């Protein structure tokens, strides 16, 4: 799904740009009924995996736990924001999600979404990839 979003002014710092993108993604998802569980969930590297981080962990209205990767680009050049979530990034997200789920007595249904922000557009890719 593509959505128009009014871009706010961003700092030249890529960290500030990323933080602003995460905040816009969070607001967007909350407007669509999702509830924040945790932000920037980080896990250290394991014996066979690199460290991982999940930008946003949300609950949707049906009780699904949604692990969200937020990617932002000024424009669609170089493949765009969504294309930047490659196999290695997916593995790190899955690793972090599995670690998070260890704390759950009964893990709920889960999915991996991507919020791709390019300029003023937000694209919400629901179930963008799976853990298999």
Image (cartoon, rainbow, N blue to C red):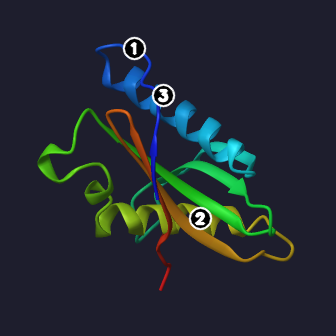
Residue located farthest toward the bottom when viewing the structure as drawn: 132
Left/right of residue 95 with respect to residue 63 in the rendered view = left
Q: Position of residue 52 (x, y in %)?
A: 47, 55
Asked where in the image residue 87 lies, by quadrant, the reply is: bottom left
Instruction: Tell me if label 2 and label 1 are in contact, CB under 8 Å.
Output: no
Q: Which of marks 2 and 1 is nearer the N terminus?
A: 1
Answer with mark 1 or mark 3, whichever residue precedes in sequence: 1
Q: Is residue 39 above or below residue 97?
A: above
Q: Tell me if mark 2 has few (under 14), some (14-19) or many (20+) residues whose alpha carbon lies within 10 angstroms of its own.
A: many
Whole-angstrom CA distance, mark 2 to mark 1, is: 32 Å
Q: Is residue 56 above or below residue 82?
A: above
Q: Which of 70 and 8 is in front in this view?
A: 8
Q: Nearer the viewer, residue 52 or 63?
A: 63
Residue under label 3 = 19
Residue 97's disc is 2
Residue found at x 48% / y 28%: 19
Residue 73 drawn at (x, y percent)? 28, 38
Q: 10 Å neighbourhood of mark 1: few (<14), some, or many (≥20)?
A: few
Q: Which of the two discs, 1 and 3, sits closer to the camera?
A: 1
Separation of disc 3 and disc 2 at Cα? Answer: 20 Å
In whole angstroms, how far apart are the C-alphas of marks 1 and 3? Answer: 12 Å
- Check disc 1 and report the residue beneath it: 9
Please name the residue shown 74% across and 46% down the image: 36
- Point out residue 21 in the picture as x, y percentages from the top left corner: 46, 33
């Amino acid at each position: 799904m593509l959505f128009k979003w009014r871009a706010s002014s961003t700092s030249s710092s890529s960290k500030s740009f990323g933080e602003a993108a995460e905040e816009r993604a969070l607001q967007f998802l909350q407007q669509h009924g999702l509830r924040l569980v945790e932000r920037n969930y980080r896990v250290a590297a394991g014996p066979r995996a690199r460290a991982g981080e999940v930008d946003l962990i949300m609950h949707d209205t049906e009780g699904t736990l949604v692990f969200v990767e937020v990617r932002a680009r000024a424009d669609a050049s170089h493949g765009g924001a969504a294309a930047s979530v490659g196999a290695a990034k997916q593995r790190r997200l899955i690793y972090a999600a599995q670690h998070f789920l260890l704390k759950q007595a009964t893990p709920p249904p889960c999915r991996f979404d991507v919020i791709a922000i390019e300029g003023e557009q937000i694209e919400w890719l629901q179930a963008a990839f799976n853990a298999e």
